[in-house]
Image (cartoon, rainbow, N blue to C red):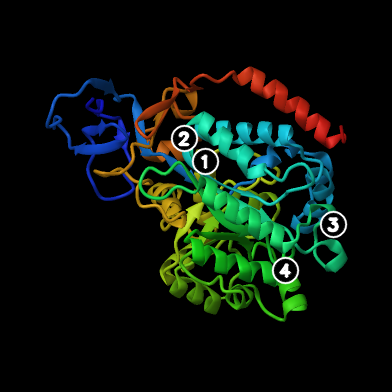
Amino acid sequence: MPATRIWLKNPLAVFTANTLDARGGLVLEGERIVELLGVGQHPARPCDHVFDAREHVLLPGLINTHHHFYQTLTRAWAPVVNQPLFPWLQTLYPVWARLTPEKLALASKVALTELLLSGCTTAADHHYLFPDGLENAIDIQVQYVRELGMRAMLTRGSMSLGEADGGLPPQQTVQQGEVILADSQRLIQTYHERGDGAQIQIALAPCSPFSVTPQIMSDSAELAEQLDVRLHTHLAETLDEEAFCLQRFGLRTVDYLDSVGWLGPRTWLAHGIHFNPQEIARLGTAKTGISHCPSSNMRLASGICPTLELLASGATIGLGVDGSASNDASNMILETRQALYLQRLRYGAEKITPELVLGWATRGSASLLGRTDIGELAVGKQADLALFKLDELRFSGSHDPIAALLLCGADRADRVMIGGKWRVIDGQVQGLDLKGLIADHRQAAHALINGL
């Protein structure tokens, strides 16, 4: 049976994340884009369906490269509202240690749903908490990614350096190295998909220099090389972290990264704020990528990622919403807006354009995850699309539709397509009882905070 052909006709505006012209729309066949049309052009062959996109701004599906789904249960919790990273973590660790499979399931579904509604089609999650009873945390996340029809890079995080040995996490959240590596190998063999159109992929992600041993970092790098998967961790987020590395390892953060075999193109780092010029040059030469997380960096007062210097050095920049307890949202189009504004504070308005940051949220983020089949609109790419309307009061009087998405504060997509299938229509996730999900999630959040 031939694949269905769809013409998304004459969008109000289109951002392709490249130099190609698609003002006449896209032709989709099955899960792929097969034609980009200029103004006045028509498809080469008849289409089964024509979607009139004249009211829509059309983007590649947004790609989130750093998140902690479980943190949707601890948003805006009063004891940590005004804390920087280290005390924020130390206050929250005991709460997060009470996670159960049921609570993680709800947290993950909420995070994924919120991302999807914001125009996000692919999400990377960094899950590093595996208390007793939650050994199969990543398996739970796989279930809900599949249920919502999204794509995900699920990173098998870990913490192996507890308080008793000079680390930050409490002992009940720490796992032994052999347990971590065995489960990492299991997850890759069970779930990791390769090639164009992959839905589920696995990466290895020891949490941070202050929560894992150098041994698990080195062992993870060797396993990633052996099984050909990517590596992810937090690095250079705060000056406290830099001081920790100097005191414990006698090394700055990039030197530490190099010492454990992580400085290379397989690695992407969350935050990447506190680098000196020599370190930036080394990251660029190594083709190591950075997930810029502007909302979290502002929320925790961590600093501003030096994006333009990193780009000039040869590094790749993508965007991440980070955890929903340090953001406190899971919204990729709003995160792109925050990137625009925060980076303008550092570099000025002329250098940081809406098109630049939308490129980070699409093509740049795809590159961080090692994907060439998503992140831009071009023939042969996956039909992962986000369509936004500009019909609300906030957009009235706007003139440039692409700029208006960010400057006027778009926060919800009207339609989202993944692999040629509509997953959001008229701002609603298809087949989802949103009110029921919110009610169950609120109850779980209350129970977690209160130890129930």
Using a 10 Å C-alpha cutoff, classify the residue at mark 1 as few (fewer than 14 neighbours), some (14 to 19) or many (20 or more): many
Alpha carbon separation for disc pair 2 and 4: 37 Å
Residue 226 x, y percent position in the rendering: 50, 66
Residue neighbourhood size for the residue with mark 2, other residues' Cα within 10 Å, grouped as few (<14), some (14–19), many (≥20): many
Report the residue at 22% width, 27% height from top. 2
Q: Is residue 448 left or right of residue 216?
A: right
* Contact flag, marks 2 and 4 (Cβ < 8 Å): no
Query: Which amino acid is tagged 1?
Result: Met
Tag 2's secondary structure? loop
- Residue under pointer 3: 171
Marks 1 and 2: CB-CB under 8 Å? Answer: yes
Sequence-wise, which precedes: disc 3 or disc 4? 3
| Of the image marks 3 and 2, the number of the one nearer the N terminus | 2
Tell me which label, 2 or 4, sits earlier in the chain. 2
Mark 4 or mark 1, earlier in chain: 4
Give the residue number, with chain letter if any, for mark 4: 213
Alpha carbon separation for disc pair 4 and 1? 32 Å
Distance Cα–Cα, label 1 vs label 3: 34 Å
Q: Secondary structure at mark 4?
A: loop
Question: Residues under labels 3 and 4: Cα distance?
Answer: 14 Å
The nearer-to-camera label among 1 and 3 is: 3
Q: In which quadrant will I find the N terminus? A: top left
Instruction: Label 3: state its secondary structure.
Output: helix
Where is 357 relative to 440, above or below? below
Q: Label 1: which residue?
A: 332
Q: Position of residue 161 (x, y in %)?
A: 77, 64
| Residue bearing mark 2 | 119
Circle 4 crowding by C-alpha within 10 Å: few under 14, some 14–19, many from 20: some
Disc 1 to disc 2, C-alpha distance: 7 Å
